[in-house]
C-alpha cells in the first residue's frame, strides 16, 4: 500500500502545475489568459481557441497520467505542450534586457523557458521510460499504460 501512495504522489507532483493550477487559472482569469495568448497569435479568436485547447490538454492529459490510462501517450502530448508553450510564450531571446548578470526581465523569462523544458523532460521520461527501447515501444503501442499502480509479485521480499 505505501508503494501505491508513493506512485500516486509522484504523479500528482508531475501534473500539479497543470491540474489543478494552470487549468483553474484559465477559468478564473480567462480574459488575462486570452490577452497573453493574443500576444503570440495576434488574433483574438485564435487566442481563445488556444486557451480552450490548452485547458483541454491540461485536464485530459493530467487525468490520464494520474489514472494510468494511456499515460505514456498523455505524457508525450503534455511534454509537447510544454515545449510549444515555451516557444510561444517564454521568448527570452526577444527581451531587450536579456543578460545573465544583474536585473533582467529577459533572464526571468529564460528561467521559465528552462523550467518548461525540464517539465517536458520529466514527462518524456514517463512516456519513453529509461532506455532507448521506450521510443519504439511508445510508437508501437501508443495507448499502452505503464500500469503505475500494479504491485509486482515480489513486493515486500528482500
Image (spheres, rainbow, N blue to C red):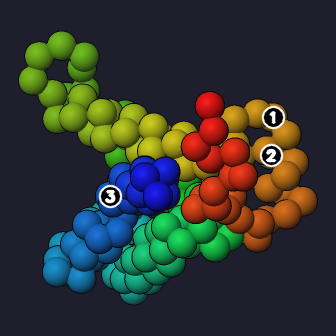
Structural crowding at the residue carrying mark 2, measured as other residues with C-alpha within 10 Å and reported as few (<14), some (14–19) or many (≥20): some
Quarter of the image that includes the C terminus: top right
Please report the residue visible at 55 percent of the width from the left and 49 percent of the height from the top. 123
Left/right placement of residue 29 relative to residue 73 reads left
On the image, which quarter does residue 26 sit in?
Answer: bottom left
Q: Which residue corresponds to mark 3?
A: 17
Left/right placement of residue 19 relative to residue 30 reads right
Q: Which residue corresponds to mark 1?
A: 132
Answer above or below: position of 120 versus 131: below
Please report the residue visible at 17 percent of the width from the left and 77 percent of the height from the top. 29
Q: What is the secondary structure assignment of the residue under circle 3?
A: helix
Q: Nearer the viewer, residue 25 or 144?
A: 144
Q: CA distance from mark 2 to mark 3?
A: 25 Å
Q: CA distance from mark 1 to mark 2?
A: 6 Å
Q: Which residue corresponds to mark 2?
A: 135
Q: Nearer the viewer, residue 75 or 113?
A: 75
In percent of width and height, residue 130 lies at 69, 35
| Residue at the limit of the structure toward the top, as seen here | 101
Q: Are marks 1 and 2 in contact (CB under 8 Å)?
A: yes
On the image, which quarter does residue 140 sit in?
Answer: bottom right
Q: Are marks 1 and 3 in contact (CB under 8 Å)?
A: no
Which mark sits nearer the N-terminus, 2 or 3? 3
Please report the residue visible at 41 percent of the width from the left and 83 percent of the height from the top. 52
Which mark, residue 66? none
Structural crowding at the residue carrying mark 3, measured as other residues with C-alpha within 10 Å and reported as few (<14), some (14–19) or many (≥20): some
In percent of width and height, residue 69 lies at 64, 73
Answer above or below: position of 24 versus 149: below
Residue 73 seen in render? no
Structural crowding at the residue carrying mark 1, measured as other residues with C-alpha within 10 Å and reported as few (<14), some (14–19) or many (≥20): few
In percent of width and height, residue 148 lies at 60, 59
Amino acid at each position: 500500500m505505501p508503494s501505491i501512495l508513493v506512485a500516486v504522489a509522484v504523479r500528482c507532483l508531475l501534473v500539479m502545475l497543470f491540474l489543478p493550477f494552470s487549468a483553474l487559472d484559465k477559468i478564473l482569469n480567462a480574459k488575462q489568459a486570452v490577452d497573453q495568448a493574443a500576444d503570440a497569435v495576434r488574433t483574438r479568436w485564435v487566442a481563445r481557441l488556444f486557451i480552450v485547447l490548452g485547458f483541454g490538454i491540461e485536464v485530459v492529459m493530467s487525468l490520464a497520467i494520474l489514472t494510468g490510462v494511456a499515460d505514456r501517450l498523455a505524457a508525450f502530448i503534455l511534454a509537447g505542450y510544454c515545449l510549444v508553450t515555451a516557444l510561444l510564450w517564454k521568448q527570452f531571446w526577444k527581451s531587450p534586457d536579456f543578460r545573465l548578470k544583474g536585473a533582467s526581465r529577459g533572464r526571468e523569462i529564460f528561467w521559465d523557458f528552462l523550467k518548461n523544458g525540464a517539465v517536458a523532460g520529466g514527462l518524456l521520461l514517463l512516456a519513453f521510460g529509461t532506455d532507448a527501447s521506450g521510443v519504439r515501444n511508445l510508437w508501437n503501442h501508443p495507448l499502452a499504460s505503464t500500469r503505475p499502480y500494479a504491485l509486482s509479485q515480489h513486493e515486500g521480499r528482500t
